[in-house]
Image (cartoon, rainbow, N blue to C red):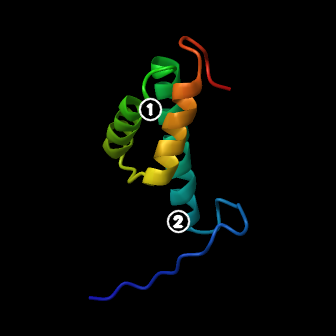
Amino acid sequence: MSSHFTINGLSSLDSSESSATRLGWQIAQRVQYIVNQVARQKAGAPADEIALELHGRLRRMGVVPNMRELNAYADHIAALPPGSKPT
């Protein structure tokens, strides 16, 4: 059994172009949603705790997180004052 498909890059951000592009947008939306949720709930918490929470929630949403980006998000959220809302 062979499957024939092509994956186009994100050079043109037209979501009607390919399923790979639509998948990329879907993943980006999931990441944004989870990061905003965690930022609202855990602002000012330790970065390690935030990274674990982000990792768990993203995995449950079907996203395999990039650890470098995940740690950067965690550092930024930890630097927020408690009770602040992300922009």
Vertical placement of residue 68 versus 73, above or below: below
Question: Residue tagged by mark 2?
Answer: 19
* Residue at position x 49%, y 36% in the image: 74
Vertical placement of residue 30 versus 16, above or below: above
Query: Does residue 13 appear left or right of residue 67 in this picture?
Result: right
x, y percent for residue 33: 52, 34
* Element carrying mark 1: helix
Amino acid beneath label 1: Ala
* Residue at position x 53%, y 65% in the image: 19
Q: How crowded is mark 1: few (under 14 residues within 10 Å), some or many (20 or more)?
A: many
Q: Which mark is residue 69?
A: none
Query: Does residue 54 appear left or right of residue 83 in this picture?
Result: left
* Residue at position x 52%, y 80% in the image: 6
Query: Of label 2 and label 1, which has the lower sequence position?
Result: 2
Question: Residue tagged by mark 1?
Answer: 47
Amino acid beneath label 2: Ser
Query: Does residue 32 appear left or right of residue 2 in this picture?
Result: right
Query: Does residue 60 appear left or right of residue 45 in this picture?
Result: left
x, y percent for residue 10: 65, 66
x, y percent for residue 43: 51, 20
